[in-house]
Image (cartoon, rainbow, N blue to C red):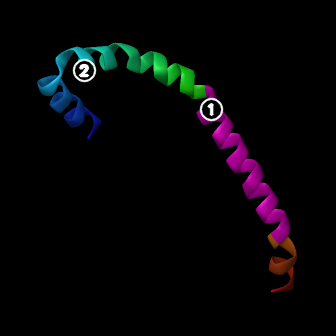
Amino acid sequence: MKLLLWFILLVICWPLALAILLFYPIIWLVLLPFRILGFAVEGVFAFIRALFMLPARVLS
């Protein structure tokens, strides 16, 4: 899907499409720590949810 959108952008505005092609890896590297942090926070929330649900699971 992203490739198709990029080809459409290439036809409409090729300088912007080339700029996106060049800057996409840099933007991906900048956003990578936030993705890793998101996985960690999601894991912590899952652990807290499991702790709160533990008494209900034990009683049922």
- The local crowd at label 2, few if under 14, some if 14 to 19, many if 20 or more residues have their Cα within 10 Å, is some
**Residue that badge 1 annotates:** 34
Say which element carries label 1.
helix
- The local crowd at label 1, few if under 14, some if 14 to 19, many if 20 or more residues have their Cα within 10 Å, is few
Q: From the viewer's side, name the closer residue of 57 and 17.
A: 17
Q: Residue at x 77, y 49 (%)?
A: 44
Asked if residue 9 is positioned above or below residue 51 in the image, the reply reads above
**Residue that badge 2 annotates:** 17
Residue sitting at the far left: 11
Give the image quarter of residue 57. bottom right
Q: Quadrant of the N terminus?
A: top left
Marks 2 and 1 close (CB-CB < 8 Å):
no
Q: Residue at x 81, y 58 (%)?
A: 48
Asked if residue 49 is positioned above or below residue 18 in the image, the reply reads below
Residue 10 picture location, percent across and down = 17, 23
Q: Earlier in the sequence, mark 2 or mark 1?
A: 2
Q: Residue at x 68, y 49 (%)?
A: 42
Say which element carries label 2.
helix
Q: Residue at x 16, y 32 (%)?
A: 8
Q: Amino acid at mark 1?
A: Phe
What segment is highlighted magenta in the picture? 33-52
* In this picture, residue 17 sits left or right of residue 8: right
- Is residue 41 a member of the stretch shown in magenta? yes
State whether the magenta stretch is mostly helix, strand or loop.
helix
Residue 7 picture location, percent across and down = 17, 29
How far apart in space, not on screen, are marks 2 and 1 (Cα)?
Answer: 25 Å
